Amino acid sequence: MSAPFVQATNLRRVFDVSKPWLNRVLEGGHLEYLKAVDHVTFDIRKGETFALVGESGSGKTTVARMVVGLLPPSAGDVLIDGVSMTDPRQALARRRLRRRIQMIFQDPYASLNPRFRVDAIISEPIRAFDLIQGERDIQARVGELLSLVGLHPDDRLKYPHEFSGGQRQRIAIARALASDAEFIVCDEPTSALDVSVQAQILNLMRDLQDKFGLTYMFISHNLAVVRHMASRVGVMYLGRIVEIAEGRELFANPRMPYTKMLLGAVPDLAMSGRQRIPVKGEIPNPINPPPGCAFNPRCPLAFDLCRRETPELIDGVACHAVNTAPVPA
Amino acid sequence: MSASPLIEIKDLRIRFHGDDGRITYAVDSVDLSVANGATLGLVGESGCGKSVTSLAIMGLLPKQSAEISGAIRFGGFDLLTMPDQTLRDLRGNRLAMIFQEPMTSLNPSFTIGDQIIETILRHRGGSRKSARERAIELLRRVHIPSPERRIDDYPHKLSGGMRQRVMIAMALACDPRLLIADEPTTALDVTLQAQILELMRELKAASGAAIILITHDLGVVAEVCDEVAVMYAGEIVERAPVDELFSAPQHPYTVGLLGSIPRLDYRAEQLATIEGMVPNMAQPPAGCRFAARCPFVLDACTRASPPLVEVSVGHLSRCIRAPLELLVS
């Protein structure tokens, strides 16, 4: 295996959430910062699916936006196929790289322009990157893409409102494939869909991956969906990756107490009555996170070190209890 | 099932008359009953009529566009023929509802205390002071920390999970006999979902109220329900005790639905999918409404609408080919 396709190192993103200057002067108050993402490092190999899971507000979407270059990181860097997403000196190389990166968004009702016909939506990347010349060839390619995602080539003459949520997500996938993308970042691609439609879209995404050797970065809060899709999984909590492991390993032997709690919270279809860690507390306020490990107020294994020092990600787990002491089973 | 159920729905049919004269057949011949202290899960995908059914029970459908027939018997009365004034006395009192989105169902311009107290004063009367004490007690019952202070908070100050707890406290304000929960955890993260489900179990055990839980998530059903009714295109296609529905589903739609859920305990190569799409409810198909998507379809299926028949004790299926075990082996 050569160098990883995507390398994110020490990503960090801070948002200024202070009140406006005048209000601060008149009403008092000081600058406030929200550290949405901190010390996030991961690699994605070519052809694999890397997933980020976590609850709302854990920073997974912010990471995705930094990876595709929609949001500049406050610190750290992302290299995609060796090209930095932040270095101004690599702007030209980055522009060439753009074609190979695409994104699929959560809400297919918001991500397709309602005034565009489907052919205009799907051909937009083709025209923007000047991939095919001649209107007839472009239309032929659009029809081909539509059949690839399970729609009819004649659907290109319709408008988005004529389609159901699942079909719209297929259109969004066709658009992502239009520029022959190699790396697709999928931000909660199925959470707005019904389960039976979700199954169709997940199957389609896996088929396309096999067919074109696509690399996915998959963002989801649904652990079962991640289990189905991902080869490697990173678990995020309050802006940090707290555990990162091969999918199979993570779901069979979660090590970090937060991962265990998260897995235990998923409703059990098999009703096997498995042992679970009861869920305690809520995510703390990210503007004012607890000192040390952010999970320590909810953690059953927390000890004094956890309240003082933020644990480093060692061997795939960021947890003092796991990394320093033998864990009681 | 006990001798006299708390609520009994007989042959409920709901049609909507659109502005353009189009008729949508939202719910068709639904029969349901829930015993005291039981939890019924009403499952189905978007547009199958599960929410409309619950709104009909609460008398919340618009009178001018919704045409309702059938009977909903609750404590000896028919809710459909009851005068509005009597229904208002029942609603929020004996009948209570929890909605999906706690942010939109709480009034942002009143404190949560005001909103709970309003319910208590409307149905129970008494002094504002005693109502406030009761409200604090209710907030404590749903595990809101320091309820004496929280009661004067506005909804925007609470997190999503806390808001849903407030909604539950409000629903419980007058000790309802029947609690309808419409997707109570869909807007929440898994860990919060686990907490809310645990709370609902706890409160049910304490109050003995019957619950109708409306959800699209079969995992949630497996966790909390005693009996399940699966709806498809406005009809109940299967009804069974919960463990039997999961171990031996008797309607092809239920089988497809179960197969399409990604699992946490193993990774399937492909998820089972249900081909095709839900029928247009402005022109429901004659015969079985699932026929166009069913792998076991026969000529007879498309000719006449199959009745809901008992396959085994307490297990009903609207499929002429049930029991399905004979088809696959």
Image: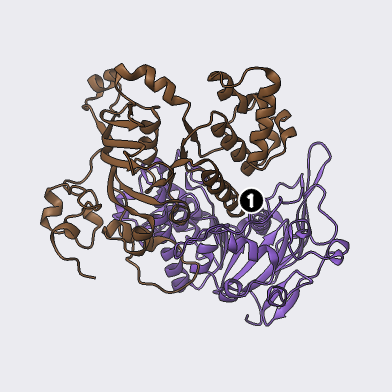
Chain colours: A brown, B purple
> In which quadrant of the rendered image does the N terminus of chain A lie?
top left
Residue sitting at x 62%, y 75%: B248
> On the image, numbered disc 1 is attached to which residue?
B46
> In which quadrant of the rendered image does the C terminus of chain A lie?
bottom left
- Residue at the extreme front of the image, as rendered: A1
Residue sitting at x 35%, y 46%: B152
Q: Quadrant of residue A303?
A: bottom left
Q: Quadrant of residue A118?
A: top right
Residue sitting at x 76%, y 71%: B308
**Parent chain of label 1:** B
Up/down of A144 relative to B123, above or below = above
Between residue A286 and residue A22, name the one nearer to us.
A286
Q: Which x, y percent locates residue B154?
A: 39, 42
Q: Which x, y percent locates residue A53?
A: 38, 49
In this rendering, position of residue B99 left or right of residue B248: left
Between residue A289 and residue A18, name the one nearer to us.
A289
Can residue B73 be seen by looking at this rendering? no
Between residue B311 and residue B22, name the one nearer to us.
B311
In this rendering, position of residue B199 left or right of residue B73: left
